[in-house]
Image (spheres, coloured by chain):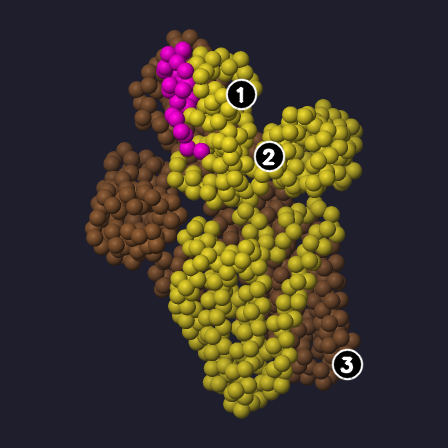
Chain colours: A brown, B yellow
């Protein structure tokens, strides 16, 4: 295999030749993102062959390196038995992440064919909302009874060394007979006391913990307040059920930001990758676009109402899209600031007056500056001061309006439990388009005798 | 203090009364985001008084809970001596984060008044780019010489218990006489061997590590590939200089996503909060808007060129903004998918042909669907099939063009080292506006006899 062969071709070749061992070895040489990239450049038939050729362990390694939605698509298309064998090799949190992206029937079928204990745990974890402590915690942690001795803990650590290798052992948790969380120990608390000491004597009692229903926002605040490397999670009966690592919180925030970014850009049906089937990509994009076409028609109908004015002063047609676009940009800036302040907790959804007071001032200043600028250009171009007044006045008024609306929209949408990332921008654009057209054309209608013939 | 008093008022009252102890106690009852919120609702004079009243430790606690750019603004405005006292209370990574947001002169002046060792370390960390291993690592880690015995390590742990309390002690690092990294130990590796054993005998030799110049992308791949709780960082002479935690990587990715989101929305001068001074907020937003006005003029000039056609078929004015807006939306979807695939490493900046092939198909399908839709509406509205043809044809052509351009732009910008988040959207909008206007008006010019009088 020459060095010039791109990984795709090498991989296709190995698949065609059915060389399982070489395949696994070759994939092992690729970085995670390379692996994801080459797998998704394969045809569907090649993908199927690949996963038939790999052992479940190797297949699971590949699955781990894909974005979750891609992994879920792949696994969904496999025979259930094969899927269950591969999924059985994933860690509990990865398993749940991938199952969570599948449709309910597919994930149920796979769980039915998996190891009973693994499946039971996965079902428990799947019941939690993704963005609460229960959905974010890991179940690989070390917990001991409060009447164990340090020697017993050390013996257990010694005996299960390889099993615990991947555990996060910054802390040991101590539980009572009913598995309720009663204490926590740092690893080095085990080093110094007499080995016959019971954990209850050396542990930190009544440790910090969170409920399994704790929201992402609460967990974020928890880790901002306490510089810890993990927090134990208890259910409503105070039983220890898992541990949330700060890493998981950052990752969840990351996912939320990705979703916000995609939704703001009109990718609203979840992630889209170019390796997904053409028609589903096209259909999902169209769903959003066809809603937008309706909003556009509503906005443009304002122009239709003022057709006579426009015909009498055709130059205005040049300024219509400029006024509406510019105000849209101003409004989107205000939307972004509100969304950012909301996500940091610096503003609460009820503080409409405060936001309004802040944005009105910006709206007046920026409206005047932009209005004078565009109005001046219009005046210089056609030598008609009234045209400058119409265009500049419309831009100033519409900038003020859209900045106010942009600032308030995310707060209002949050209050009625709509996602600002999804709704703010199309709503804002429609309103600022309508109002932009209306201001230009109604001002022009009032001053039509002065504009005649431009 | 009644329960109904909002925290702002309580805080203002305590500041006016100059009650330092009560102030510190009151702030302690607030959550981090509440603290940040109330501090920034204070007037500047109140903020100054507050930080004069608090001890440096308490002030540092407050600083920790603010977004970094806000914290930097606050500290910059303090007398240097006071700022240095407060900054001395921050951990090394927080200190560097806040200093990094200040202007060079201010941060230099503060460092000059700080403890010499702290300042030296901070200067070293500040020299690293923010998004490389050196800028992301912590310097609080445990390292021992390879010829130390386990007993010596235990004695050190015992003696410095309180100092090490906030350390991340998932791993111990082992260095040779020249401070070069030679091994790593997990905490529980200390529990079992004889206490006279030398670390060199039990450590894992030649451990995984990264260079202090490693990029964020490389670190991301590292933690994707290795499920570790931290990685040691070495400089060019293989000396151990710090430890990067996976948490820091996720946080850095988070910050990058926030920046992308803000830039996409036209907040380009860094973060904006409504507590910042009015004129600097207004000026920063205007900088972006005035560039946009130029782009808008370029696009709208196409309409000016076709004024006669428009006057002869004034109904077209209704469809101009619709065609350009709709294509802009289609193009932005393609931009988002490209940016997402680039950030995941699923596509490389050079793979223009692959992206183009994928987007052309979407562009043809969605262009046809949207074109037939809008063309049909135009036809039904005015009863003129030629109008439908002009409008629908223009939308179809412009959708295809903008989807192709949107898919390619992020890759092209990446190749010339421009930020896609900053440049894609305004460039795309300008081109799709221009072309949208051009398609509608040039098709209409060609078919003008058939359109007459609509």
| Disc 1 packing (10 Å; few <14; some 14–19; many ≥20) | some
Q: Magenta stretch containing residue A1, yes or no? A: no
- Asked if marks 2 and 3 fall on the same chain, the answer is no
In the visual, does A332 lie left or right of A199? Answer: right
- The Cα–Cα distance between marks 2 and 3, rounded to whole angstroms, is 66 Å
In the visual, does A127 lie left or right of A308? Answer: left
How many numbered circles does the render carry? 3
Closer to the chain start, of discs 1 and 2, is 2
Q: Nearer the viewer, mark 2 or mark 3?
A: 2
Chain for numbered disc 2: B
Q: Describe the element under mark 3 as helix, strand or loop.
A: helix
- In the image, the segment drawn in magenta is B184-209
Q: Describe the element under mark 1 as helix, strand or loop.
A: helix
Looking at the rendering, which quadrant does residue A343 occupy? top right
Residue A56, image x, y percentages = 25, 42
- The Cα–Cα distance between marks 1 and 2, rounded to whole angstroms, is 21 Å
Residue A120, image x, y percentages = 30, 36
Chain for numbered disc 3: A
- Asked if marks 1 and 2 fall on the same chain, the answer is yes
Which residue position holds label 1? B164
Which residue position holds label 3? A450
Residue B157, image x, y percentages = 50, 16
Q: Describe the element under mark 2 as helix, strand or loop.
A: helix
Q: Nearer the viewer, mark 1 or mark 3?
A: 1
Residue A276 higher or lower than A126, as above or below? below
Which residue position holds label 2? B125
Q: For the point 63% across and 32% down, which residue is it?
A: B122
């Amino acid at each position: 295999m020459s060095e010039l062969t791109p990984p795709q071709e090498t991989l296709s070749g190995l698949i065609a030749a059915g060389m399982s061992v070489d395949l696994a070895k070759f994939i092992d040489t690729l970085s995670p993102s390379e692996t994801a990239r080459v797998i998704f450049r394969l045809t569907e038939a090649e993908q199927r062959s690949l996963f038939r050729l790999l052992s479940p362990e190797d297949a699971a390694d590949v699955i781990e390196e894909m974005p979750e939605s891609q992994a879920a698509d792949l696994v969904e298309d496999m025979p259930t038995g094969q899927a269950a064998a591969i999924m059985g090799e994933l860690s509990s949190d990865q398993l749940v992440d991938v199952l969570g992206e599948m449709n309910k029937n597919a994930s149920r079928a796979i769980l039915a064919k998996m190891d009973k204990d693994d499946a039971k745990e996965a079902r428990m974890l799947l019941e939690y909302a993704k963005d609460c402590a229960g959905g974010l915690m890991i179940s690989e942690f070390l917990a001991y009874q409060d009447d164990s001795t340090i020697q017993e803990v050390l013996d257990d650590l010694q005996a299960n060394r390889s099993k615990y290798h991947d555990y996060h052992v910054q802390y040991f948790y101590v539980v009572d007979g009913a598995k309720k969380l009663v204490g926590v120990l740092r690893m080095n608390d085990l080093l110094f006391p007499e080995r016959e000491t019971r954990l209850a004597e050396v542990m930190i009692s009544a440790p910090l913990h969170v409920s399994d229903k704790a929201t992402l926002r609460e967990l974020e605040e928890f880790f901002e307040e306490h510089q810890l490397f993990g927090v134990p999670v208890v259910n409503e009966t105070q039983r220890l059920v898992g541990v949330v690592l700060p890493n998981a919180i950052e990752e969840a925030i990351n996912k939320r930001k990705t979703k916000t970014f995609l939704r703001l850009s009109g990718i609203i049906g979840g992630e889209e990758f170019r390796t997904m089937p053409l028609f589903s990509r096209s259909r999902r994009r169209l769903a959003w676009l066809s809603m937008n076409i309706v909003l556009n028609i509503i906005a443009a109908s304002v122009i239709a109402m003022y057709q006579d004015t426009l015909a009498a002063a055709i130059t205005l047609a040049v300024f219509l899209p400029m006024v509406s676009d510019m105000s849209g940009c101003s409004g989107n800036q205000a939307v972004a600031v509100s969304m950012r302040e909301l996500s940091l907790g610096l503003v609460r959804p009820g503080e409409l007056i405060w936001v309004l007071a802040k944005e009105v001032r910006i709206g007046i200043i920026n409206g005047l500056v932009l209005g004078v600028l565009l109005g001046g250009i219009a005046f210089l171009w056609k030598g008609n001061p009234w045209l400058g007044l119409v265009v500049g006045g419309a831009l100033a008024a519409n900038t003020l309006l859209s900045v106010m609306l942009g600032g308030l929209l995310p707060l209002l949408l949050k209050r009625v439990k709509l996602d600002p990332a999804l709704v703010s921008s199309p709503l804002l654009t429609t309103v600022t388009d309508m109002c932009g057209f209306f201001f230009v054309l109604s001002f022009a209608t009032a001053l039509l005798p002065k504009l005649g013939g431009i």
